[in-house]
Image (spheres, rainbow, N blue to C red):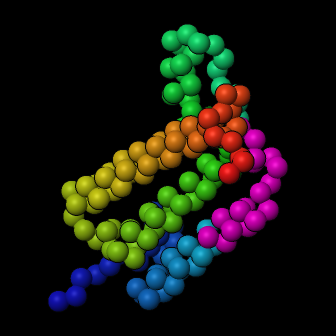
Amino acid sequence: MAQEHKLAIFRGRWKFKSNTHKIWGVLALLSFVTAIEVILGIYKPDILMHTWMDPVQGSGFFATVANIILSPIVYMKPLNFIFILLTIVKAYYITWDFMHVRDEVGSLRKMIVWTGVFLICYLVFIILQEGGYVFEAYHGDDSIITHDF
């Protein structure tokens, strides 16, 4: 006996007639999000290429803690933040609709979604931390590595 799939996305705001229409609708949504990412990646608007605020100055404990807490989001370029959010949106719709996680029991959905959320946040944190280190290694005042290879 075939199981009925839910035929709505955007929390029920966009409904489809059949499962085939839903697949095409989600594909159109993912294509639109990908097109936005490609256009932003090609043009790189100047307004999105500057950080929201500078790091907290000072060598004290509070300046260090503030920089650690604020570095993943506030010191990031808005363009990178947009790319991360759009990638998470695409990953959500791929797993939720194409892999039919929406139709599973609640505990399995929570286990899959929260594991993915945790791993994505951890990966973003590691990439940002290592990227800052590599940037300082190449461009810092006392850089260890030079560009003369």
Q: Is residue 25 left or right of residue 139?
A: left
Where on the picture, by quarter, is residue 77?
A: top right
Q: Residue 36: x, y in percent? A: 68, 66
Q: Extreme right residue here? A: 46
> Residue at the location (22% across, 88% down)?
2
Examine the rendered structure and indicate whether residue 1 appears above or below residue 116: below
Examine the rendered structure and indicate whether residue 36 appears above or below residue 2: above
43 part of magenta stretch: yes
Instruction: Name the one closer to the observer, 63 or 82.
Output: 63
Q: Is residue 126 left or right of residue 73?
A: left
Q: Is residue 137 left or right of residue 45?
A: left
> Residue at the location (32% across, 51% down)?
114
Examine the rendered structure and indicate whether residue 113 appears above or below residue 47: below
> Residue at the location (58% across, 79% down)?
28
**Where does the magenta region start and end?**
34-51
Figure quadrant of the N terminus: bottom left
19 part of magenta stretch: no
Q: Does the rendering let one see residue 35? A: yes
Q: Is residue 136 left or right of residue 122?
A: right
Instruction: Name the one closer to the observer, 122 or 117.
Output: 122
Examine the rendered structure and indicate whether residue 44 appears above or below residue 102: above
What kind of secondary structure does the magenta stretch mostly adopt? helix
Q: Residue 78: x, y in percent? A: 68, 46
Q: Does the rendering let one see residue 132? A: no
Instruction: Name the one closer to the observer, 8 or 72.
Output: 72
